[in-house]
């Protein structure tokens, strides 16, 4: 199957979208949010077709699932994006040179944004909203697991665009076949940037095989360090929230690191986790403390592979350390540089943790569940970048823009 037509259509749409006014963009996004809520029953029906094909024990099941509440939240995010300041045409710098040339640097769209993602139908809404607001065309390659959901969502988007006589190819959904992924990875001259969202396996494959530029939105291997001064009640609630609020997301806690002077607090920390039926993979010291105080069917001895694992389920590892530096070393060795947290009442440790930990989002006394575009005031996110070039952390409107130089003269020529 040839995918050339999809990419050619995207290029044409890229030229058309520049004529869409900021006011029209706002109107489209608000109308789409309203339509999503109005069409909740239809969206859930199509989503159920996808859910019926997936095992409920699959970690991707929760990511795939739409609910009325989740659609309401998606709609709110689109309204939030619509209400944010228009990100294009901002003068980032300006100067007039001695020879009279006026040089301005202004914000512009990235261009054609390709996104490869797995069983996350909400991404279809999020990517469109953010790309449309920033004047980008999006070419989407969703997973076959979410085929019915994505088709229903893109049809809804196209219906709203049609009301405003906007080229529907500003949002293109590629077929779910694997061949579409290969075509996207090789779409030189068509795709300006490719963003993978999903498992580490997907991200690694895209990074290794793509011939177009890639922004990695990495898997989250997330740690929280409970140091010798941490507040027990506050820390217990934060740990439980970070682990259990929604286990299938990339900001969910994977490994609790605890200072050995606080091991006797583990049974208390474990009470909330046990209520949520969290399986714990504990190292030798923490296992000895928890044995007899934590449900035996949920407590296991950790193996080396449990550290540095993104569980995406009700599972968590525990690592005991004897110093602040040992905690930092463990994080440095196993982190995916997504989100890391410390629980402490020591201002020196807090400042050192913020300074020394290399991650996109670093927390003190708060749940890592907040690593999210909407929670960071970005309206929504196209992904959470774990790399350092161009974008890092939740990618909102600003991260979907580039810039160009505008040079105005009056007959200037450059002498040898």
Image (cartoon, rainbow, N blue to C red):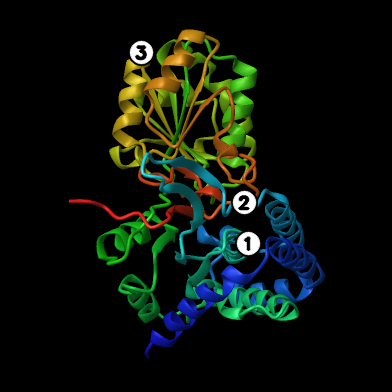
Crowd rating for badge 1 (residues with CA inside 10 Å; few <14, some 14–19, many 20+): many
Q: Residue at x 58, y 44 (%)?
A: 372
- The answer to whether the residues at label 3 and label 2 have Cβ atoms under 8 Å apart is no
Q: Disc 2 on helix, strand or loop? A: loop
| Of labels 3 and 2, the one closer to you | 2
Res. 236 image quadrant = top right
In the picture, the quarter occupied by the N terminus is: bottom left
Secondary structure, mark 3, is loop
The residue carrying mark 3 is: 323
The residue singled out by tag 1 in the image is 129
Residue 309: x and y in percent read 37, 44
User: 216 left or right of 342?
Assistant: left
Mark 3–mark 2 distance (CA, rounded to whole Å): 38 Å
Question: Quick one: label 2, few (<14), some, or many (20+) residues within 10 Å?
Answer: many
- Frontmost of labels 1 and 3 is 1
- Residue 380 is labelled as 2
Q: Is residue 256 above or below residue 58?
A: above
Residue at 64%, 36% in the rendered image: 275
CB of mark 1 within 8 Å of CB of mark 2? yes
Q: Relative to residue 255, is residue 114 depicted above or below?
A: below
Q: Nearer the viewer, residue 191 or 269?
A: 191
Residue 22 appears in which quarter of the rendering? bottom right
Q: Nearer the viewer, residue 189 or 389?
A: 189
| Residue 31 on image: x %, y % | 77, 67
Could you say whether the residue bearing mark 1 is in a helix, strand or loop? Answer: helix
Q: CA separation, marks 1 and 3?
A: 45 Å
Residue 318 horizontal/vertical position (percent): 42, 30
Residue at 58% across / 32% down in the picture?
A: 367
Q: Is residue 224 left or right of residue 390?
A: right
Tell me: 315 left or right of 215. Answer: right
């Amino acid at each position: 199957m040839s995918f050339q037509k999809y990419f050619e259509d995207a290029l044409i749409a890229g030229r058309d979208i520049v004529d869409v006014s900021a006011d029209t963009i706002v109107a489209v996004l608000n109308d789409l949010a309203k339509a999503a809520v109005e069409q909740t029953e239809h969206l859930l029906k199509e989503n159920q077709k996808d859910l019926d094909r997936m095992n409920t024990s699959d970690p991707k099941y929760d990511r795939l699932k739409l609910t009325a509440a989740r659609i309401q939240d998606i709609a709110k995010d689109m309204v939030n994006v619509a209400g944010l300041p228009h990100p294009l045409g901002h003068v980032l710098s300006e100067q007039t040179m001695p020879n009279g040339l006026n040089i301005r640097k202004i914000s512009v769209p990235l261009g054609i944004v390709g996104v490869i993602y797995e069983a996350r139908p909400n991404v279809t809404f999020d990517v469109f909203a953010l790309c449309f607001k920033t004047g980008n065309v999006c070419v989407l390659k969703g997973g076959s697991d979410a085929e019915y959901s994505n088709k229903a969502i893109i049809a809804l988007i196209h219906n709203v665009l049609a009301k405003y006589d906007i080229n529907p190819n500003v949002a293109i959904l590629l077929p779910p076949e694997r061949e579409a992924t290969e075509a996207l990875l090789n779409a030189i001259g068509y795709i300006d940037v490719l963003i993978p969202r999903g498992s580490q396996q997907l991200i690694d494959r895209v990074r290794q095989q793509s011939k177009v530029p890639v922004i990695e939105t990495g898997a989250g291997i997330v740690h929280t360090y409970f140091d010798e001064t941490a507040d027990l009640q506050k820390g217990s609630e934060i740990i439980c929230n970070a682990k259990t609020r929604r286990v299938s997301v990339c900001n969910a806690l994977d490994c609790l690191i605890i200072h050995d002077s606080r091991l006797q607090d583990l049974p208390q920390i474990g009470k909330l986790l046990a209520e949520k039926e969290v399986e714990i993979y504990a190292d030798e010291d923490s296992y000895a403390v928890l044995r007899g105080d934590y449900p035996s069917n949920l407590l296991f001895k950790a193996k080396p592979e449990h550290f540095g694992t993104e569980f995406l389920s009700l599972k968590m590892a525990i690592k005991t350390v004897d110093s602040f530096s040992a905690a930092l070393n463990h994080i440095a060795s196993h982190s995916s540089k997504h989100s890391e947290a410390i629980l402490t009442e020591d201002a020196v440790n807090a400042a050192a943790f913020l300074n020394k930990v290399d991650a996109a989002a670093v927390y003190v006394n708060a749940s890592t569940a907040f690593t999210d575009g909407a929670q960071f005031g970005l309206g929504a996110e196209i992904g959470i970048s774990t790399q350092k070039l161009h974008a890092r952390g939740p990618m909102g409107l600003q991260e979907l823009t580039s810039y160009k130089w505008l040079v105005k003269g009056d007959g200037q020529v450059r002498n040898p």
